[in-house]
Amino acid sequence: MSLDAEEAAPQPTRCAIVVDASLPAGRAANAAAVIALTLGKRHPHLAGPDLVDGSGRAHPGLIPIGIAVLAAPAEELNDLRAKALKNGIDVVDFPTQGQQTTDYAKFGALGSRPRR
């Protein structure tokens, strides 16, 4: 999905990240962080305006609707993905290969094919 500057951004009501329930906490947090970054790139309109604290310092805007981070058994993730796509819900995948290297080129060689 791509938005032109002139297009009105859709107003989502919910945002969730679902990770493999068998992942250790650190890997689950990493997966959620990677997915959240990709969501921000794909949907920059999700971030709210900058916030100013009591001392007048500005802080980057957060997502006003929040992001629920949920877990599901690995064997259910493909079905969840298919159902989401069938219902027109945007899906960001983070293949397991993404946690096997910190080298993006190697990540691509492990089976992921980034689109340009």
Image: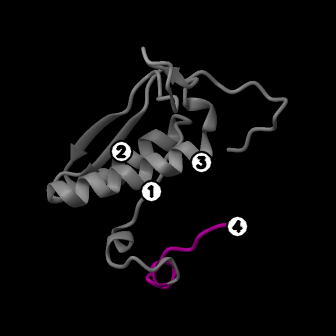
Q: CA distance from mark 3 to mark 2?
A: 22 Å
Q: Amino acid at mark 4?
A: Arg
Q: Is residue 73 magenta?
A: no
Type of amino acid at the residue the image marks with label 2: Leu
Q: Residue at x 47, y 29 (%)?
A: 62
Disc 2 element = helix
Q: Residue extending furthest front?
A: 55
**Circle 4 — which element?**
loop
Tally the marks.
4
Q: Nearer the viewer, mark 2 or mark 4?
A: 4
Q: What is the chief secondary structure element of the magenta stretch? A: loop
In the rendered structure, which disc, 3 or 2, sits on the residue that comes first in sequence? 3
**92 w.r.t. 4: above or below:** below
Q: CA distance from mark 1 to mark 2?
A: 12 Å
For marks 1 and 4, the one nearer the N-term is: 1
Per the rendering, the mark at residue 85 is none
Q: Looking at the figure, which quarter contains the N terminus?
A: top right
The residue segment tinted magenta is 106-115
Q: Residue at x 55, y 31 (%)?
A: 47
Query: Where residue 38 sits in the image (x, y, percent)?
Result: 52, 51
User: Which residue was labeled with disc 2?
Assistant: 80
Give the residue number, with chain letter if any, for mark 1.
93
Tell me which residue sits at (47%, 21%) in the image: 64
Quarter containing the C terminus: bottom right
Q: CA distance from mark 4 to mark 3?
A: 14 Å
Residue 82 placement, left or right of 113: left
Q: Pointer 2: residues within 10 angstroms few (<14), some, or many (20+)? A: some
Dot 4: few (<14), some (14–19), or many (≥20) neighbours within 10 Å?
few
> Label 3 is placed on what type of residue?
Lys
Q: Is residue 12 left or right of residue 74?
A: right
Q: Which residue is the site of mark 3?
A: 41
